[in-house]
Image (cartoon, rainbow, N blue to C red):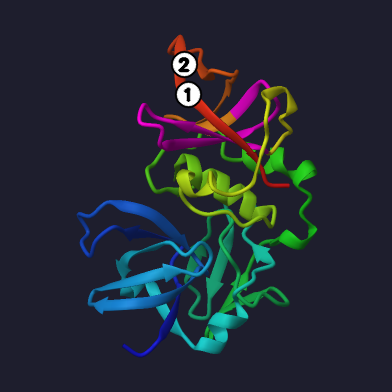
Amino acid sequence: MEQKFAVCRVAVAPLRADASDKSEIKTQLLFGDEVEVLEQAEPWWKIRNAYDEYVGWMDFKQLKVISASDYRACSVHRFLAPVAVVNRLTAADGSVFYLPASAQLPAYKDGKCYLGDDVYQVEFVPHDVALSDPLRDLERLSFFFLNAPYLWGGKTLFGIDCSGITQAVFKMLNIRIKRDAIQQGEQGVIVDFLPEVKMGDLAFFDNAEGRIIHVGIMLDANRILHASGKIRIDPIDDQGIYNPELGRYSHKLRIIKRFF
């Protein structure tokens, strides 16, 4: 197949394990996410997300084909949708899109962004990752998602999973991490002891077989923001996360990593 590139043209799109609407949603693409097309079996295309190299199947109608030069030009994004409930974008035909936080604004300039030759009016002040300061901004960005419902594979305020929120927040801090918790656990630098934790360190948790299955954002040495039913803040110690509502530990601590 001739090499083909595309960009997500809808606010949020499911990326599935297999070419079926009944297949598991592995993750989501947001508006402006560029992809490489690996296979075509219409209406399904197998794609690789340029941002985190995640591979899955999606409905090709949710993509717009772009040139290789446009794909390469948008490999690094400075401007994203900010942490706001309403991020309004207007297409040339007057139709409106509402973008989730951290959605990319390809080729943004003078209040407009571009998907290939399609022009969109950006009706909000974008988040400029070049101006992000992790120590200053992490709490504000992560707290935006508080009480968002848990959704396997989700990446938005209306449904998000444990590694989805860590990736979204770090993306807005201009720190690129992988999509799944087990992949994120392979990145960063080890923090040896819990008292040495700094805000923004990521804590990882394993199951009985020793496989990393959960991740959360450390707010300090005693509190963690994570997804468990919803985005919540719980106490943490050397044993793991304690859920006061359940009256027991919910996750067993494996390792803590630092990314900035």
| Circle number at residue 9 | none
The residue identified by callout 1 is 252
Q: Is residue 91 above or below residue 27?
A: below
Q: Residues within 10 Å of mark 1 (few under 14, many from 20)?
A: many
Percent position of residue 160, x then y: 46, 43
Q: Could you say which is closer to the camera, residue 178 or residue 34?
A: 178
Q: Is residue 34 above or below residue 25?
A: below
Could you tell me if residue 158 is visible in this image? no
Instruction: Check disc 2 and give the amino acid type.
Output: Tyr
Q: Give the residue drawn at x 67%, y 24%.
A: 194
Side of 4 where 103 appears, left or right: right
Could you tell me if residue 214 is visible in this image? yes
Residue 222 among magenta residues:
yes
Q: Is residue 210 above or below residue 241?
A: below
Side of 222 where 134 appears, left or right: right
Side of 65 where 123 appears, left or right: right
Q: Please tell me in which quadrant of the rendered image residue 72 appears.
A: bottom right
Dots 2 and 1: beta carbons under 8 Å?
A: yes
- Boundaries of the magenta span: 201-224
Q: Nearer the viewer, mark 2 or mark 1?
A: 1
The residue identified by callout 2 is 249
Q: Could you say which is closer to the camera, residue 84 or residue 21?
A: 21
Percent position of residue 37, x then y: 38, 77
Q: Give the residue drawn at x 32%, y 52%.
A: 25
Image quarter where the N terminus lies is: bottom left
Q: Give the residue drawn at x 42%, y 79%.
A: 64
Tell me the element at label 2: strand
